[in-house]
Image (cartoon, rainbow, N blue to C red):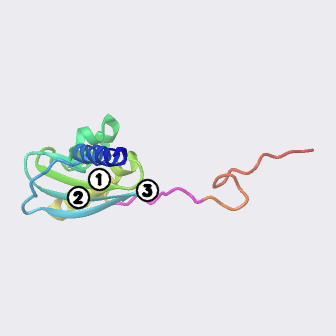
Amino acid sequence: MAEAKKTTVRKVVKKAATAAVSKISLPKLENSTYATGKRKDSIARVYIALGKGDMFVNGKPMSDYFKRKVLQLIVTQPFEVANVTGRYDIRATAHGGGLSGQAGAVKHGISKALAIVDAGLRPALKKAGLLTRDSRVVERKHFGFRKARRSTQFSKR
């Protein structure tokens, strides 16, 4: 009897947890352009379409997903460089790495999508360095070292 109660309680708790995690259902962007952005270990899929400036990352408004102001500035940088702030709606999914890498990946994806949508924006984005993928990644740990380059402490005696 006690076992049956435990399993039903677990099921109810599990259902409540999955309901809380479920994403906001967003309408699909009509006539959208797709681009992939990458930074560190993060990958972002970005869909861009003409609209009124709505930006959603992983089903949440951009300001809720990237709470730090610096990350929000990173994501909106391509629009300011191209002088098209508030003209395009964005739907992005980002995964891998941390929030900083994901913000950089979304920025890269937005830049590539803007260059596809309007070829006239490409020179400004290229000059600002937004179309180049920042290929810096964490160096792997090497054998005999504590970290990638950190050696063990030297002992004279």
Residue 30 screen position, x and y as percent: 6, 60
What residue do we see at 33% from left, 41% from top? 71
Which amino acid type is shown beneath numbered disc 1?
Answer: Val
Which amino acid type is shown beneath numbered disc 2?
Answer: Val
Q: Which residue is mark 2?
A: 46
24 is within the stretch colored magenta: no
Q: Which residue is mark 3?
A: 40
Secondary element at image label 2: strand
Label pair 1/2, CB-CB below 8 angstroms: yes
133 is within the stretch colored magenta: yes
Question: In the image, 91: left or right of 155?
Answer: left
* Residue 106: image tag: 1
Give the magenta range: 132-140
Q: Earlier in the sequence, mark 1 or mark 2?
A: 2
Q: Earlier in the sequence, mark 3 or mark 2?
A: 3
Could one spot residue 88 in this view of the protein? Answer: yes
Residue 99 screen position, x and y as percent: 37, 46
What residue do we see at 30% from left, 36% from top? 67
Q: Residues within 10 Å of mark 2 (few under 14, many from 20)?
A: many
Question: In the image, 55: left or right of 140?
Answer: left
Residue 21 screen position, x and y as percent: 26, 46
Above or below: residue 94 compared with residue 71: below
- Give me the C-alpha separation between circle 1 and circle 3: 12 Å
